[in-house]
């Protein structure tokens, strides 16, 4: 069984708690991002689809999807569930709200944190489920994420041939410098013969030296010599949220909820459209700052 709840639903918290209380067997609860550009349904994404295919006869799932809309940005059903499951342990409550929580009979049995990819999450989820149910086998230890076989030693780089014994000066490897060196050698040779390549009476084409000099000046500079524009520095998330660095997690969450509630659509409904857009940008900025703090905590 798979159920999907959405942050935009005003009753999402009550529905989530009802699923937790009614579950008899193992139940998995996790949150996902589900923006407008994501075409696949939350239950069709990994690792949820693979878990349902492999262990759907034993495991039930409740997926809480955050659409990133202003209607649900101030709600935190997973945070509320973590506080309910671990009222005396803020650290474990936060881990349950941001990872995968496995329950049985309404009681938490294991919390699996999210890893770099759904495949890694699937391995650790199966490992945790195998301890809860004898009908779920343990995963292959050889496929444990992070378990790598020793790699062979790197091969020596290919040689580019022996150095020249002719005594002639070696040309630079950079084609830009090689071209410049040839032009300088040609200019010195012309000066030694006392000829002006740019003069109309000489044997060379009129203006050829000037054309070559112009081409050298206007040619594209060698790779790596162009200036690169510096990226704008990201804003300090503590400053965005208006709290001091190092504020405890529960106090920071209260400040985050109070701040984001100020930009709720109902609060700006009477204002002009440009203020609606400003409130959405400010809401997204606050969310990005909170996510940055969560990543730092992990």
Image: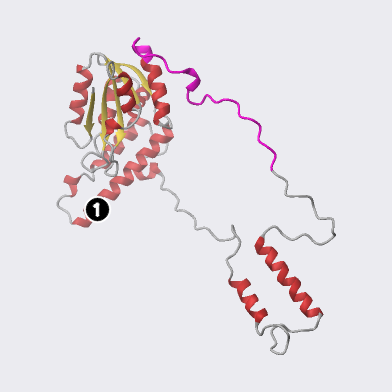
Assess whether residue 82 is covered by the magenta stretch.
no
| Residue assigned mark 1 | 277
Compare residues 31 and 124 and report the one nearer the observer.
124
Residue at image position (79%, 50%) is: 162
Residue 146 horizontal side relative to residue 45, left or right: right
Looking at the image, the residue that sits furthest to the left is: 270
Compare residues 215 and 97 and report the one nearer the observer.
215
Please, is residue 244 above or below residue 249 in the view? below
Assess whether residue 154 is covered by the magenta stretch.
yes
Residue 265 horizontal side relative to residue 32, left or right: left
Residue at image position (61%, 73%) is: 215
Q: Position of residue 274 (x, y in %)?
A: 22, 57
Residue at image position (78%, 76%) is: 189
- Magenta span of residues: 130-157
Q: Position of residue 94 (x, y in %)?
A: 35, 27
Looking at the image, the residue that sits furthest to the bottom is: 201
């Amino acid at each position: 069984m798979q159920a999907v709840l959405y942050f935009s639903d005003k009753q999402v918290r009550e529905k989530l708690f009802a699923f937790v209380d009614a579950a008899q067997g193992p139940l998995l609860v996790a949150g996902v991002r589900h923006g407008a550009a994501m075409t696949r349904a939350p239950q069709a994404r990994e690792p949820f689809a693979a878990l349902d295919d492999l262990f759907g006869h034993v495991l039930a799932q409740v997926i809480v999807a955050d659409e990133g809309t202003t209607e649900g940005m101030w709600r935190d059903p997973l945070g509320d569930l973590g506080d309910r499951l671990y009222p005396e342990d803020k650290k474990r409550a936060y881990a349950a709200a941001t990872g995968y929580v496995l329950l049985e009979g309404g009681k938490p049995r294991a919390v699996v944190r999210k890893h770099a990819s759904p495949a890694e999450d699937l391995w650790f989820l199966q490992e945790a489920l195998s301890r809860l149910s004898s009908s779920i086998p343990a995963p292959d230890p050889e496929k444990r994420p992070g378990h790598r076989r020793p790699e062979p030693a790197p091969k020596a780089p290919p040689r580019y041939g022996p150095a020249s014994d002719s005594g002639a000066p070696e040309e630079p490897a950079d084609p830009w410098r090689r071209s410049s060196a040839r032009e300088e050698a040609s200019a010195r040779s012309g000066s030694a013969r006392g000829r002006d390549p740019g003069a109309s009476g000489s044997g060379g084409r009129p203006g050829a030296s000037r054309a070559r000099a112009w081409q050298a000046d206007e040619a594209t500079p060698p790779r790596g010599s162009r200036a690169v524009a510096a990226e704008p520095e990201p804003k300090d998330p503590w400053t965005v949220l208006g709290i001091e660095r190092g504020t405890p997690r529960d106090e920071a969450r209260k400040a985050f909820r109070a701040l984001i509630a100020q930009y709720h659509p109902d609060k700006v409904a009477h204002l002009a459209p440009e203020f609606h857009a400003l409130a959405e940008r400010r809401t997204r900025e606050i969310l990005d700052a909170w996510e940055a703090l969560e990543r730092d905590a992990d």
